[in-house]
Image (spheres, grey):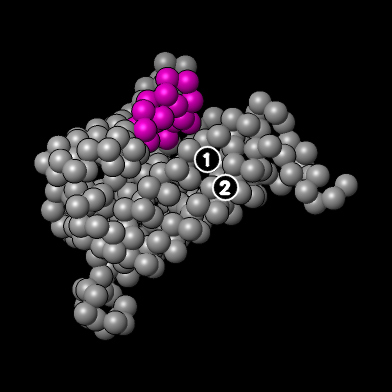
Amino acid sequence: MSALGKVSFGDLFTLANGVLGFVAIAYVVAGSYLYATGLLLISMIMDGLDGYSARRFGSKHTRGQVLDSISDSISFAFAPALLIYAELRDPLVASPTGSLENFAILICAAAFMAAGLFRLARFSAGGYQLRYFTGIPAPAAALFILLVCMLFGATDGSESSDLYFAIDEVPVVILLCAVASSMLMVSQIPYPKVKGWMAKVSAMGIAAAIMPYIVGLAIVDDQQLYTAFSRTATGIALALTICYVIGGPLYERRKRAES
């Protein structure tokens, strides 16, 4: 059987996840932070669909878990870390270590990437067999950081400045969230697996985060309406994500106590 003949339906979504992550990195390098964020949000949809497709249609091989982790490492570790650094660094200082500010941002971004890789490796090495997640999942941590960047990150980039709707540039908020996310990913804190009603809520959160890219573009001519709508949709998505970040361990602990 040829290599293409061994590709399962779910593999297409997994590969799409990794490809979107790579394209998002290209947009980050070009300074198109909103476009990059939008692509990473879509990659999260692909990540959800690959698991569903594998369960629904089966797989032609046993390498799906490895392929999924590789794609996730691009979209949920490398790309968000680069976005953090690119948005917050001082563009007047070329070197990442040329100033204390750039160096601190580099350390926080690198910590997020390293924690994401560790989290994905731990999951692939056997964590997927547990009925719960050990540490916050890398996609959830990435979503958290992306939403925080949208609201408190760059207010301008290579896209039209009219498309940016950040409340204000508050680098310290992003850096603290990156450090907190990194610690949660490498922790032993149990998080519930996203399925059932929780999967529906998660889908609502991602849908809300994508809304500024869909409905928002239709009302971009009304700057005030576009900004208010985008901030509200992103804020709702962030609130739902924070509910999982903080409430997830509490829910898992309660579920264990009842069983």
Magenta-span inclusion, residue 204:
yes
What amino acid does circle 2 point to?
Answer: Ala
Identify the residue at horizontal 44%, vertical 57% (top origin).
24
Specify the quadrant of the image occupied by residue 247. Answer: top left
* Image spot of residue 192 (x, y percent): 44, 30
Question: On the image, numbered disc 2 is attached to which residue?
Answer: 16
Q: Residue furthest top?
A: 258
Q: Residues within 10 Å of mark 2 (few under 14, many from 20)?
A: some
Earlier along the polypeptide chain: callout 1 or callout 2?
2
> Seen in the image, is 158 located left or right of residue 186?
left
Secondary structure category for the residue under label 1: helix
Q: Give the prevailing secondary structure in the magenta stretch.
A: helix
> Seen in the image, is 184 located left or right of residue 76?
left
* Image spot of residue 240 (x, y percent): 29, 32
Question: On the image, numbered disc 1 is attached to which residue?
Answer: 46
What amino acid does circle 1 point to?
Answer: Met
* Image spot of residue 108 (x, y percent): 31, 64
Height in image: 203 above or below 80? Answer: above
> Seen in the image, is 94 located left or right of residue 11?
left
Q: Tell me how far mark 1 sits from mark 2, CA to CA.
A: 7 Å
Q: Which residues are magenta?
A: 191-207
Q: Are marks 1 and 2 in contact (CB under 8 Å)?
A: yes
* Image spot of residue 219 (x, y percent): 22, 38
Identify the residue at horizontal 14%, vertical 37% (top origin).
225
Q: Residues within 10 Å of mark 1 (few under 14, many from 20)?
A: many
